[in-house]
Amino acid sequence: MALKNEGRGRNFGISFEFFPPKSEEMEGQLWDTVAKLQDWDPDFVSVTYGAGGTTKAPTLSAVTRFLSQTPLATASHLTCVGATKEETHQMIDTFRKVGVKHFVALRGDAPGGVGAPYQPHPGGYANAAELVAGLKSVGDFEISVSAYPEKHPESRDTAADIEMLKRKADNGADRALTQFFFDNDNFERYLERVRAAGISIPIVPGIMPIQNLTQLKRFAGACGAVIPAFLDERFAGFDDKPEDRAKVAAEVAAEQIEDLVRRGIGDFHLYTMNRAPLVSAVLDNLGYSRRASKSAGAAA
Ligand SMILES: Cc1cc2nc3c(=O)[nH]c(=O)nc-3n(C[C@H](O)[C@H](O)[C@H](O)COP(=O)(O)OP(=O)(O)OC[C@H]3O[C@@H](n4cnc5c(N)ncnc54)[C@H](O)[C@@H]3O)c2cc1C
């Protein structure tokens, strides 16, 4: 690959997303994964917050361990669904007390699940833009927010999505992490519209290395992500060949990142699904260096 030929420098930044474990076994898997991935020296890691705030305690516990037992800069995801402003601020305070300085601020999905009609809590924040303002009103937090290059499923159209993104940026968001996508041309068009709307914060592509294409297809539609036909072609014939499947998955994600770097993208948020081998294979394919100082060549 071209990037590999450029040497083992780091010409882009990375962050990793994890989810909080729900069982002892998953807990073991998470920390084993973190031990393996931390050598990649990500700019930050983030820990998701369960639908409707359901994984508050596991998120807090995982974030606390990241901050106290690893060298990794750690962001906590935070949603405002189903909570009064006071309850949300109590959570912010709890996270702040364990050392959280960076939040991924989200509205969250309706308690009925993805796609169910969303009703803001009468005494709560109505959307992520309001949550960003709420966070900024109590502390100088670093704030990441979501973005949807292929449109949020509840959104009227891309223009409405971009309007919401602008409100989040205007209220103080530092960057947006996107829903995963596989169509770089579409992302580039989206980015042009975002910039034309006067939004200047970094829009960091969310990269999903494909652990299992069939499973991914099952939840992609609900999160506003399109699975292009070329992926079926790439994975065809490998259903019963996990090693070949993993090789293709690592190539697909590395090619996507490589192409986006060529288009001027400088940072990537990798959805790890709490597993190390595929993420490491992607970065190895790209010739990314472990624990090296970053080169000055990073694109904006
Ligand atoms: C990087 C990333 C991380 C995430 N992490 C988590 C997590 O940890 N926990 C979790 O529960 N979920 C998470 N989500 C999912 C997210 O909570 C859902 O997509 C949720 O439905 C929207 O939250 P938001 O902050 O993106 O909403 P917002 O930014 O407030 O809205 C997103 C878009 O939806 C449209 N919209 C919102 N509300 C309405 C409405 N009532 N009517 C019409 N259109 C509307 C708007 O156009 C808006 O642009 C994550 C998503 C991303 C991309």
Image (tube, helix red, strand yellow):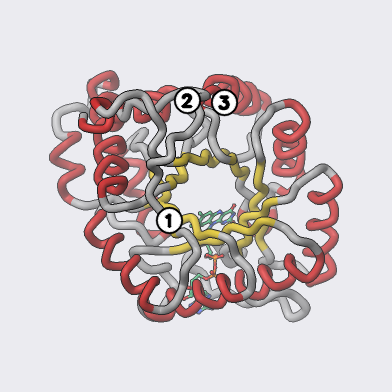
Q: Quadrant of residue 29?
A: top right
Q: Is residue 89 above or below residue 11?
A: below
Disc 1 Cβ-to-ligand 1 distance below 8 Å? yes
Give the residue at mark 1: 179
Q: Nearer the viewer, mark 3 or mark 2?
A: 3
Mark 2 neighbour density, 10 Å: few (under 14) some (14–19) many (20 or more): some
Q: Residue furthest front?
A: 296
Give the residue at mark 2: 276
**Front position in the image: 263 or 234:** 263
Q: Amino acid at mark 3?
A: Gln
Residue 258, labelled with which disc? none
Q: Amino acid at mark 2?
A: Ala
Q: Residue at x 52, y 39 (%)?
A: 16
Q: Quadrant of residue 159?
A: bottom left
Q: Earlier in the sequence, mark 3 or mark 2?
A: 3
Mark 1 neighbour density, 10 Å: few (under 14) some (14–19) many (20 or more): many
Q: Earlier in the sequence, mark 1 or mark 2?
A: 1
